[in-house]
Image (spheres, rainbow, N blue to C red):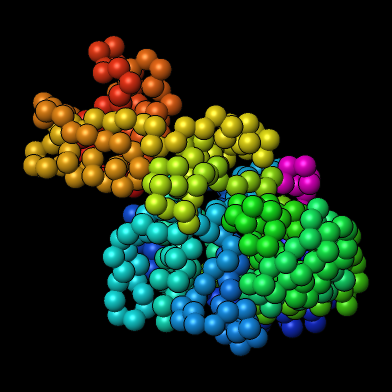
Amino acid sequence: MLAALVLLGGGAGAWLYMSLDGNIHSAGIKGKLGGDRPDNLSPGSKNILVVGSDSREGANAKYGKGLETMQSDTLMVMHLSADRKWAGVLSLPRDSYVPIPACDKGDGTTSEPHSFKINESFAIGGTTGDVTGAAACTIKTVEQNTGLRIDHFMSVDFQGFKGMVNALGGIEVCPKEPIDDKKAHLKLDAGCQTIRDEKALGYVRARYGVGDGSDTGRIGRQQEFMQALADKARQKLTSPKDLYGFLDSATKSLTTDEEIAGIKPLAELASSVQGIPSDRLHFLTVPNYPREADIPTDKANVVWQHPQAGKLFSDLARDREVTSKQLKAAASDKIYASQVRVQVLNGTKEPGAAAKAAGRLRKLGIPATTGNAAASADSTEITYPKGQRAQARILAAHIRGDVKPEAAAKAAAGQVTLVLGPDFKGVG
């Protein structure tokens, strides 16, 4: 869509501009985000939260019934570097089990903080069908769990996606095996073929009838499809007719925050990134593994793999380029949370703080015990013995706030120690 907007901004015609500008819906989210947000660590860069919304209203009703709240099928953060020489599209698996903060539900009530699949945040904020509330709760959840400051928001629904694909005459895909997914309304033969309309939508939504049936497998197909769609848009959208059909479908189903809710600001954004070469547009997925490895009874969710996920978020926050090859290599060194043994000591004046923190860690699958009360601590600290640095970094990733693990000469063998200080903000 950004590639197409570059052409529009280049003078495709004022009639196109006027016709399309009124299609875009605006969501006033700023007043709903609160003040406890991550700092912007790289001025000039942009983080845009992109949601593929599968609202089941109107023409979308055939994709599922009995859903009373808004739904999100795809969740991504698009990072644009400050110098606009590279970009990363980071997919957040919808089955990611994460803490979800308290959110305004739009019906006069506020949800309780809890942990669940990350895409539930969109449904909680959108309880009344308001995309503004859905976007606000999703942004709060993503910011809390990644530390990334979200600058803008975009949501595109099913119908807009199909329209964009159709305007390009379809997209070629090459599945290695037949796909038969009744939930995605898709039956597809193996081999290369051009798909459009319902088949295109089904292809990016398919999960249970292809591969290992995982959400991460679907993300891979979505990323490949988006890359192919972007490449074809650059090649094909050379006439006003093609351009209009593509952007009309895109903008009619598009909701953004107020700052970019219009053709002019979107075209300006597009122009700023048009020079990014294809080999520096990186499609990334948060490193993850089945939560079953930590909590044997949970066979439905994934958890983010640390310390790799934390480093990924830190790199993007500081505008450091990350490639899929680098991320894949780092993620190959996997340590489960259940392999991290922790002793929690209370260095605060709050009785029971250590037991509470240890209990929360155990819910995350981290074996945690409490020890004798520590002397009053000036700040929260994590120490580890030789050979336990990676385990200490995994623990640090689950402690709210900036706590850097340090090696300790007298640390207990095979065990990481967490001393709670007055600055302890909790486990997340």
Q: Is residue 86 above or below residue 156?
A: above
Q: Residue at x 55, y 29 (%)?
A: 333
Q: Residue at x 45, y 71 (%)?
A: 123
Residue 401 visible from this viewpoint: no
Give the left or right position of residue 275, taking residue 390 as reference.
Answer: right
Where residue 80 appears, x then y in whole percent?
63, 49
Q: Quadrant of residue 30?
A: bottom left
Give the left or right position of residue 348, taking residue 27 as reference.
Answer: left
Q: Residue at x 54, y 68 (%)?
A: 72
The range drawn in magenta is: 274-281
| Badge count | 0
Q: Residue at x 69, y 45 (%)?
A: 282
Q: Quadrant of residue 372?
A: top left
Give the left or right position of residue 344, taking residue 170 as reference.
Answer: left
Give the left or right position of residue 416, taking residue 375 as reference.
Answer: right
* 337 vs 7, nearest the viewer: 337
Where residue 331 appears, x then y in whole percent?
57, 35
Q: Quadrant of residue 420?
A: top left
Where residue 224 appears, x then y in whole percent?
75, 53
* 63 vs 424, nearest the viewer: 63
* Quadrant where the image shows the N terminus: bottom right
Where residue 356 appears, x then y in whole percent?
19, 45
**Which residue, as the protein is rendered here, is positioned at the far top?**
409
Would residue 365 be counted in the magenta stretch? no
Residue 110 visible from this viewpoint: yes
